[in-house]
Amino acid sequence: MAETNDFGTIEWHDLTVDDADRVRDFYQAVVGWTPAPVDMGGYSDYSMMLPDGEVAAGGICHRRGQNAQIPSQWLMYIRVTDLDQSVAACSAAGGKVILGPRNMGEDMRYCVIQDPAGAVCALFWRR
């Protein structure tokens, strides 16, 4: 994920699908991204690296385990200052929480929300 303290910015994109291996190969062939496996305990998701191999363009994930409820679409992760406050504001403003909040490691949390128009994104907080 990008190293930034700029709240309100889009920090990451990923795509969760039933057949991540097939979609990984598609993006490798079409745009030249190189997959870097991410161990998920029994299977791998992928950070898709730019052609230079140094920077991740986004992720491609299997829809299973903790990702089973995430819709198949490119999902942007927007950095927020307080995830719990943003979740409360989402609900109060007519949106809904689809998934989470959940921990990612010890210093990150996220949730997937839907806005009143039906668009989906993720809110992301990092210590």
Image: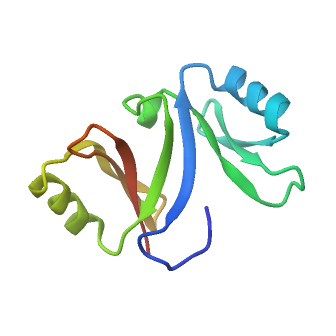
Extreme-left residue of the structure: 92
Tell me what residue is drawn at x 78 percent, y 49 percent. Answer: 49
How far across and how far down the image is residue 45, in percent? Answer: 64, 37
* 37 or 12, nearer to the observer: 12
Extreme-front residue of the structure: 117
Report the coloring of the rendering: rainbow
How far across and how far down the image is residue 93, in percent? Answer: 13, 56
Extreme-bottom residue of the structure: 5
Q: How many marks?
A: 0
34 sits left or right of 85 in the view = right
* 105 or 5, nearer to the observer: 5
- Quarter containing the C terminus: bottom left
68 sits left or right of 51 in the view = left
Tell me what residue is drawn at x 34 percent, y 75 percent. Answer: 81
* 21 or 38, nearer to the observer: 21
Tell me what residue is drawn at x 75 percent, y 32 percent. Answer: 27
How far across and how far down the image is residue 117, in percent? Answer: 25, 40
How far across and how far down the image is residue 120, in percent? Answer: 36, 42
Tell me what residue is drawn at x 14 percent, y 52 percent. Answer: 91
- Quarter containing the N terminus: bottom right
Write down the quadrant of residue 97 in the picture.
top left
55 sits left or right of 120 in the view = right
Write down the quadrant of residue 67 in the picture.
top left
Write down the quadrant of residue 26 in the picture.
top right
